[in-house]
Structure formats: C-alpha cells, structure tokens
Image: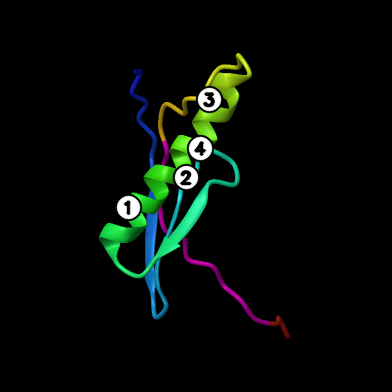
Amino acid sequence: MKTYRFSVVIERDEAGYFAFCPGLQGCYTQGDTYEEVLENIRDAIRLHVEDPLESGEEVPQVESISLTSLEVAVGTQT
C-alpha cells in the first residue's frame, strides 16, 4: 500500500467545518466537528486517488501550496 501526502485547507463557519484539497480538483467535504471533517476529507482524497490508479494513471502530486492573505478594495470610484 502506497502513502500519498496532500495539502488540505479546513475552514470553520457557523454551520461547521469545510475542507478541500487544492491538489485534487473537486475534492471537498464538510463535517460538524474538526475530527469529522478530517475523516471525511481523508475518505474523499482516497476516492479521488483510487480512481486514476485503477485506470493506470498517475496521481497528481503538488509539491507546494502557498497560503497568503490579501487586502482587496471593493467599492465604486467617484
């Protein structure tokens, strides 16, 4: 069994937790608790990785993810 490492982003809001894997397009999930969302994203990643492997394709491996914050001005100019 081969092990893969993926970056995961987890956000919390009033409804619970949301997680996604930037390296796997469309790989996201949610959960009521932090522990639940971790389990759910692990399962989602496993499903996203198993499909290409069964088809003989390679699993995409993103070497690094950069996380930053930006200031964005919003409004009308007069």
Tell me the crowding category of disc 2: few under 14, some 14 to 19, or many 20 or more residues within 10 angstroms, Cα based.
Answer: some
Q: Does residue 23 appear in the picture of this structure?
A: no
Q: Earlier in the sequence, mark 3 or mark 1?
A: 1
- What SS does tag 4 mark? helix
Q: Which residue is mark 3?
A: 60
Residue type beneath disc 2: Ala
The answer to the question of whether label 2 and label 4 lie on touching residues, with beta carbons closer than 8 A, is yes
Q: Quadrant of residue 16?
A: bottom left
Q: Residue furthest top?
A: 56
Could you tell me which residue is drawn at 37 percent across and 26 percent down?
4
Q: Position of residue 21 (x, y in %)?
A: 46, 44
The residue that label 4 is drawn on is 47
Please tell me how many numbered marks the rendered image carries: 4
Between marks 3 and 1, how big is the CA–CA gap?
21 Å
The range drawn in magenta is 65-75
Magenta includes 69?
Answer: yes
* Residue under pointer 2: 44
Please tell me the numbered disc located at residue 38.
Answer: 1
